[in-house]
Amino acid sequence: MKTIKLLILICCAAIDTACNNSKNPALSGVYINQSQSEYSMAYDTLIIDAVNLTAKTYSIESRTGFQKIRNGQKLPMQFKKETWQAVWNSEQQMLSEGEYGRQIRLSPDTPGVLIKKTLFRKIR
């Protein structure tokens, strides 16, 4: 009888884990975006790492390299790096960062994520 109870408990735990994983997709990885305008060129990288899957918290490192263009001449490359924390919201299917209100959603069309309307393609 104890064996049957233990087996049922293990099955319930496995089902619960499987259900939670489907609501919390594998977001960890490296994402890139490149953009250019008349006035600058930018190369963005997002590195998303799971900090605690139970609490659904992630660490996001944003690295940006940009080059201003003035009078048709490219100025020296400048770099910026930020690190922030976000929480996965299962209901809205997005990562939410509290300090600046950033929201990262999964891209429905391509493997990647969206910040506002900017697509970051997953490379790893």
Image (cartoon, grey):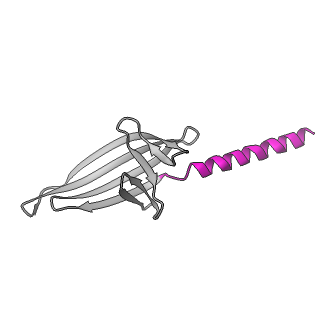
Q: Is residue 20 magenta?
A: yes
Identify the image quadrant of the N terminus.
top right
Identify the image quadrant of the C terminus.
bottom left
Residue at image x 40%, y 57%?
31
Residue 61, position as x, y percentages in the image = 37, 46
Position of residue 76 in the picture relative to residue 106 (left or right): left
Residue at image x 40%, y 54%?
114
Q: Which residues are magenta?
A: 1-28
Q: Residue furthest right?
A: 1
Residue 10, position as x, y percentages in the image = 78, 44
Position of residue 36 in the picture relative to residue 96 (left or right): left
Position of residue 72 in the picture relative to residue 51 (left or right): left
With respect to residue 107, does 94 lie above or below?
Answer: above
Q: Is residue 39 magenta?
A: no
Residue at image x 34%, y 38%?
100
User: Quadrant of residue 34 in the image?
Assistant: bottom left
Residue 108, position as x, y percentages in the image = 48, 60
User: Quadrant of residue 122 in the image?
Assistant: bottom left
What secondary structure do most residues of the magenta stretch adopt? helix
Of 75 and 35, nearer the camera is 35
Number of callouts in the render? 0
